[in-house]
Image (cartoon, rainbow, N blue to C red):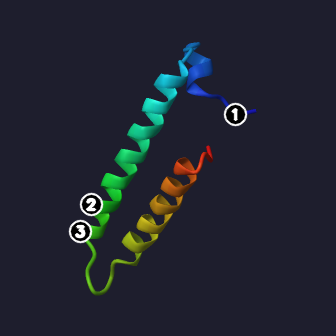
Amino acid sequence: MTLDLNDILKVKNTPNEEERHLNMTIKVLKEQVEVFTSRLEPHDTGHLHTAISVLTHRIGELENGGG
């Protein structure tokens, strides 16, 4: 069983609030991709490529309705 912060706090979000939260999460992830992309160098930045890939995949999940 996993705990959800909303369950712990007994917060009831309206669909509008959930959509706003989802959009903000996507925005923050996209900003982080931009930051990491700006730090890429010709070598020794494989970890950044990995992070960018993971974040890009997660953005796609969220945009396509995946939780």
In the depicted view, which residue is nearer to us: 24 or 16? Answer: 16
Give SS at disc 3. helix
**Residue that mark 2 sits on:** 35
**Distance CA(mark 2)–CA(mark 1):** 31 Å
Q: Is residue 55 above or below residue 3?
A: below
Query: What's the residue type where badge 3 is placed?
Result: Ser
Give SS at disc 1. loop
**Residue that mark 1 sits on:** 2
CB under 8 Å between discs 2 and 3: yes
Q: Residues within 10 Å of mark 2 (few under 14, many from 20)?
A: few
Image location (x, y in percent) of residue 50: 46, 71
Q: What residue is rendered at 31% in x and 64% in y?
A: 36
Give SS at disc 2. helix
Precedes in sequence: disc 2 or disc 1: 1
Image location (x, y in percent) of residue 44: 33, 82
Q: Is residue 2 above or below residue 49?
A: above
